[in-house]
Amino acid sequence: MAERFDLQGRHGKSRVRVSRVWRRPAAAGGHLFVEWSVAVSVVSDCLPSYTSDDNSAIVATDSIKNTVYVKAKECTEVVSMEEFAVILGRHFTSVYPQVSEATVTITERPWERVLVDGKPHSHGFKLGSEKHSTEVIVKKSGSLLINSGIQGYSLLKTTQSGFEGFVRDRYTLLPETKERIVATEVTAWWRYPFEHVSQLPSKPFCFTQRYQDLKKVLADTFFGPPDVGVYSPSVQNTLYLMGREVLTRFPDIASIQLRMPNLHFLPVNLSGKENPGLVKFADDVYMPTDEPHGTIEATLTRANSKL
Ligand SMILES: O=c1[nH]c(=O)c2[nH]c(=O)[nH]c2[nH]1
């Protein structure tokens, strides 16, 4: 008898790029504009399409792609990325009996309103750097998982950082220091507390506002007060303080995952037989590097969380 196999498949469409404009009058704040890259992946009961030539249960990935544009068109009111992802996830899991679950991932291209002579422009945007993403999983029952994140958030400070007291053995060359540049490119992911579509907040845009607030908490904790800063004894400690501050400020966030590569700025000392002490490092000239870099990451979860 032929061997039997379990098969767990999923299918969808990735990198579906969509932009949406909401044309508000200038007096109401001007146009809103987003550019999203959407990935949809559905868990669908279409086993015969894998094991035979029967495609009758397949929702074509081309139709999945089209749905992204249809739903964008239907969003006549402003929606955040997270809300749009829930709309898509709800659509696939409610319209198609064979679809039990949908994962919708969206990454936003960070178009930011320009300022002209210090005034927000009503319809002009420029590209920023760090990116906002979300991953939403919707089940047929309406149960939900919403994780959102930030990528490519580059932060640097020129002082108030050191690294001392680490293991010294026969492999150690790194001198201890109380003075260095610290630079990183933060990746963070956090989970929202809504576990069912019925719990979603009705206030539009709250996810977008939360992203902005969270980004500010991360940066403010990294930098410290504008005039004096705050001393960082290690990237590990700074990462912990950033995560702790997020969980303290936002009680509805149960957990945050932070990845903070340590992008080294190496002291430049140049010396040769002919030119002894050509360049002597005095906390002034550095060689910026990104390879190799330290990898520091941690997840902070509330001790009483049920996660
Ligand atoms: O903040 C730091 N953490 C480390 O773990 C480490 N390791 C290293 O070489 N430099 C640093 N800096």
Image (cartoon, rainbow, N blue to C red):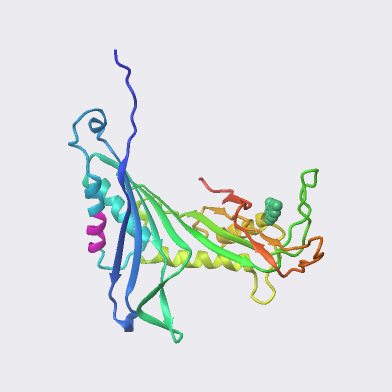
Q: Is residue 121 magenta?
A: no
Q: Residue at x 47, y 66 (%)?
A: 129
Q: Left or right: where does residue 186 sit relative to residue 199?
A: right
Q: Residue at x 26, y 31 (%)?
A: 50
Q: Position of residue 232 (x, y in %)?
A: 70, 62
In the picture, residue 59 is in which quadrant? top left
Q: Left or right: where does residue 254 sit relative to residue 5?
A: right
Magenta span main SS: helix
Specify the farthest residue to the bottom. Answer: 117
Q: Residue at x 80, y 47 (%)?
A: 168
> Which residue occupies the foreground of this view, 243 or 70?
70
User: How many circles with numbers are drawn on the protein?
Assistant: 0
Q: Left or right: where does residue 300 sit relative to residue 108?
A: right
Q: Residue at x 29, y 70 (%)?
A: 21
Specify the farthest residue to the front. Answer: 274
Tell me which segment is drawn in magenta: 67-74
Above or below, 34 relative to 71: below
Q: Position of residue 224 (x, y in %)?
A: 65, 69
Q: Position of residue 227 (x, y in %)?
A: 67, 77
Q: Position of residue 111 (x, y in %)?
A: 40, 69
Q: Quadrant of the N terminus?
A: top left
In the picture, residue 56 is in which quadrant? top left
Above or below, 196 relative to 160: above
In the picture, residue 201 is in which quadrant? bottom left
> Which residue occupies the foreground of this view, 181 or 218?
181
